[in-house]
Image (cartoon, rainbow, N blue to C red):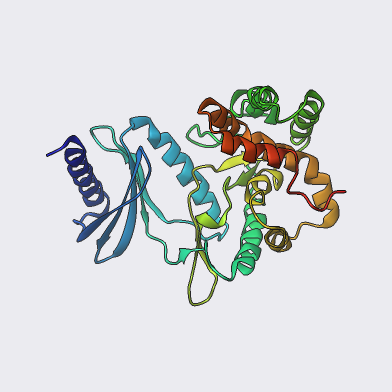
Amino acid sequence: MSVAARRAVRLRRVARYIFEQAAGTAPGRIRVQDGGLTNHVFVLENDDGAFVLRMDERDDKVHQYRKERWAIDHARRMDIPAPNVIEVGNTPDGVSFMLSRREPGRPATGREDTLGILRQLGQYARKLHRETLGRFGGLYDGETAPWHGWVDFLQHEYDLDRRLYQLLSLGLVDEFTARRMSDAVMRLGDGREPRLNHGDLRLKNVLVDDGSGRISAIIDWENAIAAPSPEWDLALALHDLSVDEKDAFLDGYGLEHEELVAARPALTSLNLLHYAPFAEDAARTGDEQRLRHYRRRFARLHDLYSP
């Protein structure tokens, strides 16, 4: 048996053990789903329904899973459809895991009723952003996010200076633009309380009920963060949507024209800054096609509405 085959057998055995400990019964069926290089995903079934088990062989990944559960618990208390997490922890040999009930519905990507789903998603985003939190950040210290101030988060977790340097060194922005971006993002925290943001409110993270067309679950809270809203979530949720799709999301959110105009400097700055590590990775790996793609975006060549 190959090394890969032995590893697969071991991981399946660990998945069965976790499920038996959490559910008190053996699964009747175990299926493997694609989870990436380190995150292993299994669907397990018994008489009580279907469950999703995410595992990581790194023992410290449990902190990330606990952060997700923290965010999900907040969302569910606000009647936002989110996964029902059963248990998070480590196995005796250090495997991190999160076990949740499998949510009903099918992925929202590729559906014909995209605009209606995005309006719903905008409504849920607005509802989510009502939640006031005590501190800023996307990390988790056992109770909440770690940073007392927005600037602390930008300096010590988000690494704002490094992101600006990445964009400058690649020629994607000039020094004047970089200063404007820095100022806009810094000012975003002035007099603002941290709010719960999903961190990746896109259609790929939405499940929809086929019958009603309603959102049945918003999944993948790995990037959840306590940050000013709506700018943080909108910068991520809107950037790859068409104009009509952007309008549908914003209509659902209920953001007035004046509010959007006021938010635009920070919104566009965050959008560009989020690209910085990906652009640097493209340069490091010699991916010229991806770099050309970023240069077109940063030069606003796709913006046909700003004369």
Residue extending farthest bottom: 211
Residue 39, image x, y percentages: 36, 41
Foreground: 3 or 190?
Answer: 3
In the displayed orientation, state which residue is furthest to the right. 307
* Residue most extreme to the left: 1
Q: Is residue 114 above or below residue 14?
A: below
Residue at image x 57%, y 70%? 112
x%, y% of residue 169? 67, 22
Residue 134 seen in the figure: no
Q: Is residue 141 left or right of residue 86?
A: right
* Visible residue check, residue 216: yes
Q: Quadrant of the N terminus?
A: top left
Q: Is residue 49 above or below residue 84?
A: below
Q: Residue at x 23, y 34 (%)?
A: 92
What is the quadrant of residue 235 in the picture?
Answer: top right
Q: Who's the residue at 34% across and 40% down the image?
A: 89
The percent coordinates of residue 40 (x first, y second) are 33, 44
Q: Position of residue 225 (x, y in %)?
A: 58, 40
State the residue in front, 98 or 42.
42
User: Front-most of 193 and 112?
Assistant: 112
- Numbered circles on residues, count: 0
Q: Quadrant of residue 195?
A: top right
